[in-house]
Structure formats: C-alpha cells, structure tokens
Image: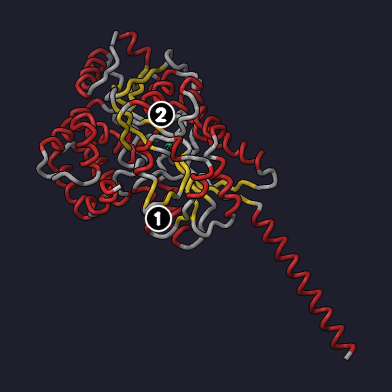
Amino acid sequence: MRKFVGLGITLLLGALFLGLVGIALAQEKENEFIIFHYWTAGGEKEAIDALFELYQKRNPGVKIVENPVAGGGGETMLAVLMSNLAAGMPPDSFQDHQGNQQKDYIDAGYLEPVDDIWAEANFEARINPMWIKTLRFGGHVYSVPINAHRTNWLWYNKKIFDELGIKPPETYDELLETCKKIKEAKPDISPLALGTREKVWSTYLYDMVLLTTGGPDFYERANTGKIDFRNDPTFRKAMERYAALIPYIYPWHATKSWDEAGALLKTGEAAMYWMGDWVLGYYLSIGMQPEVDFSATAIPKDIWMGHADTFPLPKGAPHPNNARDWIRMCTTPEAQKAFNLIKGSVTIVNDVPPDVYPDPYRQRSANDLRTLRAVCDGFHGGMITPAFGSELMDILTRFLVDQDVDAAIQAIAEAAERTNLAEACSWFWEQ
Ligand code: GAL
C-alpha cells in the first residue's frame, strides 16, 4: 500500500513539475513578438527600427523576432506570408495595406477584428473618413494603419531643373513637355527614372495616367473594373499617354529596385522619378538635401493619392497579447510621429500637426490630406485586387518593352474579366 502511495506522490510531483515546465515554456513563448515586413531599404529600415525601440520600452521582456524580406513592394514577403498563413503558422503581425490587399486575408478567415483597440483609442474620429472605406469590412476593422504615404509625387533633381530653367510640371502635358526638354538639352540623361526589378512599380505610372487623364471618379471606376476596358476612349487615351512616356524612361529599369532607381537622381543619371514618398525617407537616409539636391511636385496638384501601411492581427497569432500591444501602440501619436519622421510618409492620425515635419513635402502632404480629394492608389492602396494586380504588372512590364497600346488594352480587359475585377471590387461601391 505504502508503495502505491509513494508511487502516487511521485506521479503527482512529476505531473506538477511537467505542468510548471509547461507554464514556463508557454511564458517563454509569450515573450516573443514575431513580425513580417519588407522594410529593408534606407529610411524604411530605420523607421521600423524606431517602432521596435518604442515597443521594447513598453515591453522590455519581449524579444522581437523580425522576418524582413528584401525587395520593396513586398512580392517575396507576400509569397512567404501567404504560405505561412495557409499552413496555420501566422506571425503576430505583418506589414499590410488596405482595401483588396487586406480583404483577401479577411475573406480567407486569416484575420481577427481589432474593433476594441480602435474604440479605446477613439481612432475613427482621428483619421480622414476616406480611410474607413478601405479598412472596415462587414462592420469590423482588422488592423491599425501607421501612416499615409502619398504616391502622386514626382521627385526631381533640383540642380538639373535649375540649370535648365525648368518649371516643375503639374499636369501630364507639362510632364511630357519637361521630358522632351531634358532629352533635348541633355541626351545622356534619362528624363524619368524607374525600377521594375519588382514589377509592381510599373503600376504606379498606370495610376498616374488614369488619374491625370480621367480624373478621380474615372480613376476609381477603372481601378474597380467598372469601365469597358476594350472600348472606353478615356482608358485608351490613358494608355497612349503611358506609351508616350516610355521613350523617356531609364532604359535599364528592369535591373533596378525602387531605391536603386531613386539613386539615379542622386548620380544625375535621371532627372525625375514618379514614386511614393518612401523615396523621401530613402533620400534623407543617404544625405540628400531637400530643396538643394532634390525637390518634388504633385501631379495633379489638387488630388492626394496614396495608401496606408497597416498592421493586422492574424487569427491564431502565437503571442496575441504582444501582437495586440503592438497594434495598440500604433494608435498613439508618439508611435505615429516616431515612424513617419523617418519613413517619408505622414501620420494617418490628424492629431499630429503638419509642422512637425522638417521638409516642405510632408508638410504639404499632411495639409493636402486634410483638404483635398483623396484616393487610394491601385495596387498597394488595394483599389485593384491582388489577382488582377499580378496580371497587370506582367502586362505593363511587357508594355514597357513593346509599347503596343492595343495589345495592352486587350490583355488588361481579359485580365479584368478572368479575375472578375468588377465583382471582386463591388464592396468599394457598397460601403
Ligand atoms: C510600399 C510600402 C511603403 C514602402 C514601399 C517600398 O508598398 O507601402 O511603406 O515600403 O512599398 O518598400
């Protein structure tokens, strides 16, 4: 009998021990925060590091585990992330956008609402209502946006402009004129920089010609598949305008990433660059002086086009408390300011005043976002779907080579049909 009691006590102690080890292991597990992002270029890397620093101060015991994947635009990271989400191995949060870029994850059941975090932070009242349209689905929000990146910026080498006495273009026609002038005066310089090693950047010029040709309403209809791509005269005109710019684009664009293409303005190999203001973060990080080495002009000047970088909460996040604290932190003016002062974007919350930025571009972006008509850009702003977007970037990279307007229009029309673009984007018009 004593033998059995002894065995019972030993088993009990053993179970207790295993239980304690289990709790310790669980706590150790809880002490990590796993995040996926692709901010690896100059400026963007320092910006996410500033957020990590703040987070570490709030959570000194938590180990931050990053999986940064090089290649701006996220093509590589997204592929890795998708397979992890599908395999039920989500990170605690990841770099995402809005609109269709987020809806696909929600529809697949990968995300958890964070309505309570928005309510606690009174977040909705602190942002431009246009963001709500692309962040709330079925009455729920699933992420917190950390910034507002403007994408209708044309960056230019100020010295080249000053030397040639060129006025910064503010319309498509003026841009084309400027390209011609630069090519004539300096045949060795590419008027327009571009880097399509990640094909997604070809879609930014597409947004520009849609917006400057048809205006914001047409732009939103085209990007949500509500036009007859094959026969719409405005769409044809937009594609002709894209084709007209191609001879002025840096010819080896397929070899460059977005930041390497941006560096062509520093070396003077290119004069202008159509790119979102993450390139401002990059220019500042490589020591270029605003209004000395470079400047920027918005085309068209009366529209703010751009997107947000957001952090969603994956369902089954391995460290949900740490994940939620990250997302909560991103609602604070302190985190928004720390990130955006480096990133090149502006805070999405309107309680950080525009004059905190030391350069005129972000002051202008922050003011314009408060006062102008705002539209989301097509790919990262999630106006188009990832399925259509991935076909579109292939079509446009081919178009950059063959400049065949008819073939591009035909291919875009077919891609929109094949991917059910209009149907997939109907939510945009129902919100
Ligand atoms: C965008 C993102 C920006 C910037 C850029 C280049 O998709 O919104 O934050 O990182 O890619 O990497």
Residue 290 pos. (x, y %)? 44, 17
Query: Is residue 69 shown to the viewer in this render?
Result: no
What residue sits 43% from the left and 23% below the top? 362
Task: Name the quarter showing ligand 1.
Answer: top left
Outermost residue, right side: 2
Looking at the rendered structure, the number of numbered marks drawn on it comes to 2
Q: Specify which label sits upstream in the sequence, 2 or 1.
A: 1
Judged left or right of residue 423, residue 101 is: right
Mark 2: secondary structure? loop
What residue sits 69% from the left and 43% below the top? 60
The amino acid on which the numbered mark 2 sits, given as a three-letter code, is Asp
Circles 2, 1 touching at the beta carbon (< 8 Å): no
The amino acid on which the numbered mark 1 sits, given as a three-letter code, is Ile
Residue 177 pos. (x, y %)? 20, 18
Task: Residue 370: name its quadrant.
Answer: top left
Name above or below for residue 66 compared with residue 217.
Answer: below
Mark 2 = which residue? 277
10 Å neighbourhood of mark 1: few (<14), some, or many (≥20)?
Answer: some
Q: Which mark is residue 141?
A: none
Closest to the observer, 430 or 340 = 430
What's the CA distance linking mark 2 and mark 1?
28 Å
Q: Which quadrant: the N terminus? A: bottom right
Mark 1: secondary structure? helix
What residue sits 40% from the left and 55% below the top? 106
Mark 1 = which residue? 106
What residue sits 30% from the left and 25% below the top? 192
Residue 200 pos. (x, y %)? 33, 41
